[in-house]
């Protein structure tokens, strides 16, 4: 039976305190997270790598038309830059994300954002608390500061900060290459979970994906959305 990785703790350990000090020096530069329909409360970002190196845009574009570059902020954060450089692969979006106390990220999925689909999102907690609940499907995870985790965000996931302090993570999007494959295949099975490959998306989920692709607006995203709409229409016509 085909399986996929639901989550995996990677064999890295970083100095979260030093990286958090660098983030605190950029306190005036937080941006509200762009995907406002998926959360309530305050969810903020500081872009370390963004499309064109833009410091005023932390949006993630899942297409090959967008060119990511380091931002000025990354040049001001040597410890964060060193952590990012630990990953010997192409990096696309890199952000520091802050889910403030009382904020909730609603259940959703991010199409294509999985090891099996060729792009992985790595989380390095810098600041967290015992009141943070981070679910991937129905499994709740408690990553600790300085640890390094991969989660399959193509699966349904949700997050809430029920504590009284901020929850701040360094989030690195990486393109899978041979180095990433070797890393994932050689990682210990401790803190790793594989599950059977799930069935195709429901019609409701497909419509949501189409809407997200249309919101991105790039030629590639719009073409994928158009192709998905045609497939869905044909399926319904012959169903």
Image (cartoon, grey):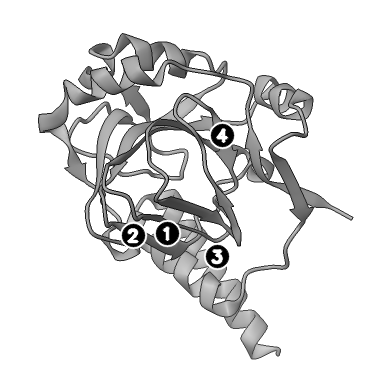
C-alpha distance separating marks 1 and 3: 11 Å
Asked if disc 3 and disc 2 are in contact, CB closer than 8 Å, the reply is no
Category of crowding for the residue at label 3, using alpha-carbon neighbours closer than 10 angstroms: few (below 14), some (14–19), many (at least 20): few
Category of crowding for the residue at label 1, using alpha-carbon neighbours closer than 10 angstroms: few (below 14), some (14–19), many (at least 20): many
Asked if disc 4 and disc 3 are in contact, CB closer than 8 Å, the reply is no
Quarter of the C terminus within the rendering? bottom right
Instruction: Please report the residue visible at 46 percent of the width from the left and 43 percent of the height from the top.
Output: 63
Query: Which numbered tag is attached to residue 104?
Result: 2
Query: Which numbered tag is attached to residue 213?
Result: 1
Residue 187 image-quadrant placement:
top right
Residue toward you, 8 or 133 = 133
Q: Is residue 71 above or below residue 155?
A: above
Give the mark nearest the N terminus, 2 or 1: 2
Q: Is residue 28 above or below residue 192?
A: above
Residue toward you, 60 or 37 = 37
- Of badges 4 and 3, nearer the viewer stands 4
Q: Furthest-left residue in view?
A: 28
Residue toward you, 116 or 95 = 95
Give the mark nearest the N terminus, 1 or 3: 1
The secondary element bearing badge 4 is classed as strand
The secondary element bearing badge 1 is classed as helix
């Amino acid at each position: 039976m085909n399986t996929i990785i639901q989550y995996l703790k990677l064999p890295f350990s970083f100095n979260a305190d030093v990286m958090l000090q660098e983030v605190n020096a950029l306190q005036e530069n937080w941006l509200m997270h762009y995907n406002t329909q998926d959360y309530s409360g305050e969810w903020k970002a500081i872009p370390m790598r963004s499309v064109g190196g833009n410091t005023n845009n932390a949006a993630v574009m899942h297409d090959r038309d967008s060119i990511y570059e380091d931002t000025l902020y990354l040049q001001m954060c040597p410890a964060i830059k060193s952590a990012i450089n630990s990953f010997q692969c192409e990096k696309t979006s890199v952000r520091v994300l802050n889910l403030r106390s009382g904020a909730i990220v609603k259940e959703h999925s991010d199409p294509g954002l999985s090891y099996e689909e060729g792009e992985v999102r790595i989380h390095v907690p810098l600041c967290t608390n015992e009141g943070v609940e981070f679910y991937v499907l129905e499994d709740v995870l408690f990553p600790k500061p300085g640890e390094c985790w991969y989660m399959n965000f193509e699966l349904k996931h949700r997050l809430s900060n029920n504590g009284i302090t901020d929850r701040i993570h360094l989030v690195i999007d990486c393109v899978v290459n041979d180095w990433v494959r070797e890393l994932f295949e050689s990682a210990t099975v401790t803190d790793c979970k594989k599950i059977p490959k799930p069935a195709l998306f429901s019609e409701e989920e497909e419509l949501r994906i189409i809407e997200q692709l249309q919101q991105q607006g790039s030629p590639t995203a719009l073409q994928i959305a158009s192709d998905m709409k045609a497939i869905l229409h044909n399926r319904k016509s012959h169903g």
